Amino acid sequence: MATSSEKLLSAILALSESCIIQRGHWNRAGLEQLTLRKSNQLDQLDYDHPDFTELIMLSLLEEIRTLVTDVPKAWIDWMNRDVPYVNHLVQHAYIKDIESTAYWMFLRIDLGVALANDVPLRIPLPMLPIPSLSLLSRTEDVCERVSHYTNAVLWLCGKALALCHQEAIPHPLATSHEVTENWLQAFGELEQWHHLRPLEFEPMVEIDAGDQVLNQGSEFPLLLFANGSGTFSNQIYHTAMLLLLQCKPRTALLNQPQSPVLSPLWHAYRICGIALNNDTREGWDPCLLASLLLAAKHMTHESQQQEILQGFNRIREITGWDTGEYLSHLREEWSFLDGI
C-alpha cells in the first residue's frame, strides 16, 4: 500500500525516524518537533476519506508513533480522544485482511491504556465465541498458529477486564447467576488456552524465585521464552488471570481451591518474572509495560519494589520508553501500603 500512497509512506518513515531517535536518546528537540508536526497532520485527517483502509492505517501508524515517542502522554491522549472509526474494525477481527491486523493492534493499544489507568476498554471485543483453541493448536502453519493464539489471549484479557468493570458497576439486567456463569466461562477459556498453548509459547527456562543458585538475588521467578510472541502471550495470560481472580464472584466454585494458580498474587509474581527478564527490544510492547505496572502494585516488600524500579530503568534503556507519572503513582501506592 505504501508504494502507491505518499501519505502512508510518509507515516511509515516518520515512525521509523521516531524509533531511531527514541532508542538512541538523542536529538530530543527534533523528536518533539516531529511529534507536533505529525499530531497536527493526524488532526487534519479526513474521516470521510474514500479509502477507509488507508485512513485506518494512517491512524494506526500515528498512534504507534506517539506511543513509542511518549508512552504516558499517548495513554492519556487516547482516553481523551474519540476513535469512532476504530469500532467498525471489530467485524474484520477474523477475516484475514489488513483491517483484521489493524483491529488487533488497536486492541493492544486500548488494552495497555485500560490496564495502566484502571478503565474499561473502549474498543469492542468480537461478538463471536472464542475460536476453538484445540483446532488452533493443531494448525500446521506456524505463523498462523502463533498469530491466532496471540489474538485469542488478547481477547481473553479483554473479557477479563470487562468482567472486572462489570463487577465494580453491575449491569442492571445481569443477574448474579449470569455474572458467575460469564466469569466461569472466561476462567475455563483461560485455563484451556494455557493447557493447549503451542510449543512456541512454552518457557524454555523456568526457575523458581527461591533458587539461590540459578536465580540468585531475585524475588521473582525466572521465565524466559524463545520468541517475543511467547513472552507477550504468557504475560498477557497471567495479566488476564490476575484481573479475573481479583473480581471472582463468591458463588464461583472451582476445583483445587489450594492451587497457586488460583492466587492473584501468584500471577502477579509471574508477570514480574517474565517482564523483568525480558531484555530484547523487539520483545517489548507498551501493553506489557502497563501489565507490569498493574502487577507491581501487589508487591509490598521493599526488596521487591527496588527490583521492580531497577527493572523499569532497564526497560527504559532497552526501549527508550519512560513511564513518567505512572511510576510516580506506583511509588505513591507503595507508600500508602507501607502506612497501613
Image: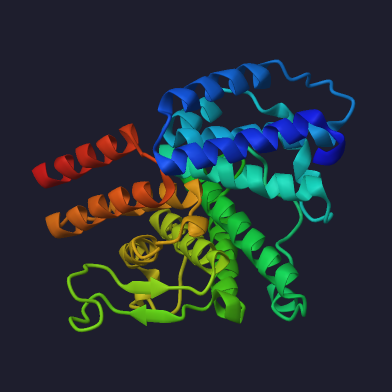
Front-most of 279 and 197? 279
Residue at position x 79%, y 45% from top? 99
Q: Please identify the quadrant where the N terminus is shown.
A: top right
On the question of residue 273 being in view, the answer is: yes
Above or below 99: residue 33: above
Is 228 displayed left or right of 107 in the figure? left
**Going 17% across and 71% down the picture, which residue do you hit?**
217
Farthest right residue in view: 50
* Quarter occupied by residue 50: top right
Q: Quadrant of residue 336?
A: top left
Q: Residue at x 70, y 65 (%)?
A: 148
**Residue at image location 15% in from the left, 41% down from the top:** 335
In x, y percent, where is residue 100?
77, 49
In this image, 263 relative to 56: left or right?
left
Along the line of sight, which residue is nearer the eye, 315 or 302?
Answer: 315
Q: Compared with residue 266, is residue 337 higher up or lower down, i.e. above or below?
A: above
Picture quarter with the C terminus = top left
Where in the figure is residue 261, as x and y percent of width and height?
40, 73
Figure colour scheme: rainbow
Picture coordinates of residue 13 (x, y %)?
Answer: 66, 36
Q: Is residue 132 visible?
A: no
Count the marks. Answer: 0
The single residue placed furthest to the left in the displayed view is 339
Q: Position of residue 285 (x, y in %)?
A: 51, 51
Q: Quadrant of residue 6?
A: top right
